[in-house]
Image (spheres, coloured by chain):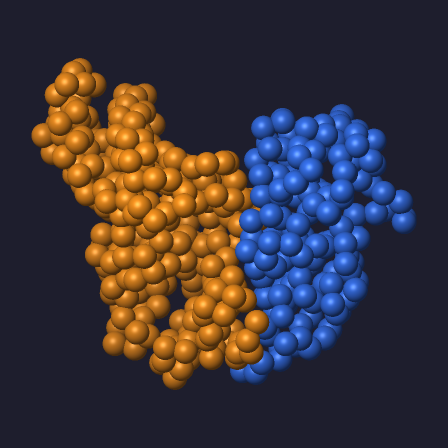
Chain colours: A orange, B blue
């Protein structure tokens, strides 16, 4: 690994100052499960690595306040997967976090790192989109609250500005009872990336939010407000064309080694139907309030 | 800021206060500086689990963690499992069930299993599969490894 400077700030202000001083040579270290790989193989050559883990204000995580649940910049997947608050209000996010890598990876990898890397296959992106997550950022010019749908551009690219730091994620608590489910297509359980990620949320008012990833440059969010998809009594024939339209945003790469585009598109429909059914059943059973 | 950093940590109960290059991983530090070569280097991308150690009670891939990140932490490697110089219950169970074939993955398997038993003394087979999903065994000794972990749990916390 190439030499770099290591900084361990104790406040967000200090971290922002180091970010500003080093410009594009600075890299943020939270879990390191992507960064350290990139540095070892020479793809990433930072001049300074800024470790966020000693910043107390970024680890104040998983607390419900003012109608939302806050995840910190250093909150790891294992915490998300096991948090009683996440399991209660955002069960599909707990499911998605539990799919990431292995226990070893989930003990280190952060949910904020997952979205900042903007991998199209990021497991937590679809549930965060379905739950309407808001990304909190800080920069020398102030703080921002960014709807997560406005964050992703394409693989490895986000709308974050140079010098801007993601400090956390806010998840608004569901106002209406909601049923949700996450599912994923993968080759093996543990340490494999997803060939498809998919999350569905249906609420009592009949709104269906569907998000899917790993089938295009960025995860997609689509919403159905006709009430047909969420209706347990509606026939499959009525749901199929709506679902088909919602899945039209998929454009899987023919170059990925994990699964061919035809297979992904076929399985996307299967996963969509299954997750929708599970979400409807969970809503009926009163899961997630 | 510097490319060397003071490190104060505990490894297998022994405290070390040293300076390390910041670009060395925890795995580099354990193997090259401390000579604890039980922890293996293999895929170096966090997929195989051969470098698994326990840091503050939780398993990590030591190839993906900078040594400086372990500052102030308590690290346990496979060398720290023995009790009074003898294999612990988990290690004995691995021997008795023929879990080690070539043996290369076994230090990592042991550390994942140890962390599981520290947290859940009565695991089911599916808990073992989940806890050890990040430890690959190319000899495919998974059955014997799972049997050994369940047997050790039985012995330690019947």
Q: Position of residue A283 (x, y in %)?
A: 28, 25
Left or right: A124, with A229 as reference point: right
Residue B44 visible: yes
What residue sits 19% from the left and 33% below the top? A208
Q: Position of residue A153 (x, y in %)?
A: 25, 58
Left or right: A111, with B41 as reference point: left
Q: Position of residue B20 (x, y in %)?
A: 67, 75
Residue A145 higher or lower than A180, as above or below: below
A154 or A279: nearer the viewer: A154
B73 or A264: nearer the viewer: A264
Dividing the image into 4 quarters, which one contains the C terminus of chain A?
top left
Q: How many numbered badges does the structure rendering display?
A: 0
Residue A28 higher or lower than A14, as above or below: above
* Residue A113 location, quadrant: bottom left
Q: Position of residue A161 (x, y in %)?
A: 27, 70
A72 or A67: nearer the viewer: A72
Residue A15 higher or lower than A99, as above or below: below
Residue A180 higher or lower than A65, as above or below: above
Dividing the image into 4 quarters, which one contains the N terminus of chain A?
bottom right
What residue sits 40% from the left and 54% below the top? A114
What residue sits 18% from the left and 18% below the top? A236
Residue B115 visible: no
Left or right: A258, with A147 as reference point: right
* Residue A156 location, quadrant: bottom left
């Amino acid at each position: 690994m190439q030499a770099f400077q290591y900084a361990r700030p104790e406040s967000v202000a200090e971290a922002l100052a180091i970010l500003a001083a080093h410009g594009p040579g600075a890299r943020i270290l939270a879990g390191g499960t992507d960064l350290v790989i990139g540095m070892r193989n020479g793809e990433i050559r930072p001049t300074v690595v800024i470790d966020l883990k000693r910043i107390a204000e970024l680890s104040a995580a998983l607390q419900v306040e003012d109608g939302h649940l806050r995840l910190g910049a250093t909150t790891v997947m294992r915490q998300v997967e096991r948090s009683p608050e996440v399991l209660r209000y955002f069960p599909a996010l707990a499911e998605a976090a539990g799919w990431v890598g292995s226990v070893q990876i989930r003990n280190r990898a952060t949910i904020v790192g997952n979205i900042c890397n903007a991998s199209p296959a990021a497991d937590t992106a679809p549930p965060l989109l379905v739950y309407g997550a808001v990304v909190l950022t800080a920069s020398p010019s102030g703080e921002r609250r960014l709807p997560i749908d406005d964050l992703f551009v394409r693989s490895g690219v986000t709308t974050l500005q140079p010098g801007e730091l993601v400090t956390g994620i806010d998840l608004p608590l569901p106002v209406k009872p909601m049923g949700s489910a996450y599912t994923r297509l993968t080759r093996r359980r543990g340490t494999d990336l997803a060939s498809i990620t998919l999350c569905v949320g249906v609420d009592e008012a009949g709104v269906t939010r569907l998000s899917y990833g790993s089938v295009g440059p960025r995860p997609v969010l689509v919403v159905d407000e006709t009430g047909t998809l969420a209706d347990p009594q509606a026939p499959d024939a009525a749901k199929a064309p709506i679902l088909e339209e919602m899945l039209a945003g998929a454009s899987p790469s023919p170059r990925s080694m994990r699964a061919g585009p035809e297979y992904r598109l076929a399985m996307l429909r299967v996963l969509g139907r299954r997750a929708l059914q599970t979400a409807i059943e969970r809503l009926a059973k009163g899961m997630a309030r | 800021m510097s490319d060397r950093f003071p490190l104060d940590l505990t490894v297998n109960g022994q405290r070390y206060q040293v300076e390390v290059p910041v670009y060395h991983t925890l795995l580099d530090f354990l193997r090259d500086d401390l000579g604890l070569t039980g922890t293996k280097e293999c895929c170096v991308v966090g997929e195989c689990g051969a470098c698994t150690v326990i840091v503050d009670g939780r398993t990590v891939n030591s190839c993906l963690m900078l040594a400086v990140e372990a500052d102030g932490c308590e690290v346990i490697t496979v060398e720290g499992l023995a009790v009074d110089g003898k294999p612990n219950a988990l290690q004995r169970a691995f021997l008795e069930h023929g879990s080690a074939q070539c043996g290369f993955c076994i230090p990592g398997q042991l550390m994942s299993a140890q962390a599981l038993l520290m947290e859940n003394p009565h695991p089911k087979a599916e808990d073992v599969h989940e806890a050890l999903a990040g430890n690959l065994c190319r000899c495919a000794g998974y059955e014997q490894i799972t049997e050994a972990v369940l047997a050790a749990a039985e012995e330690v916390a019947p």
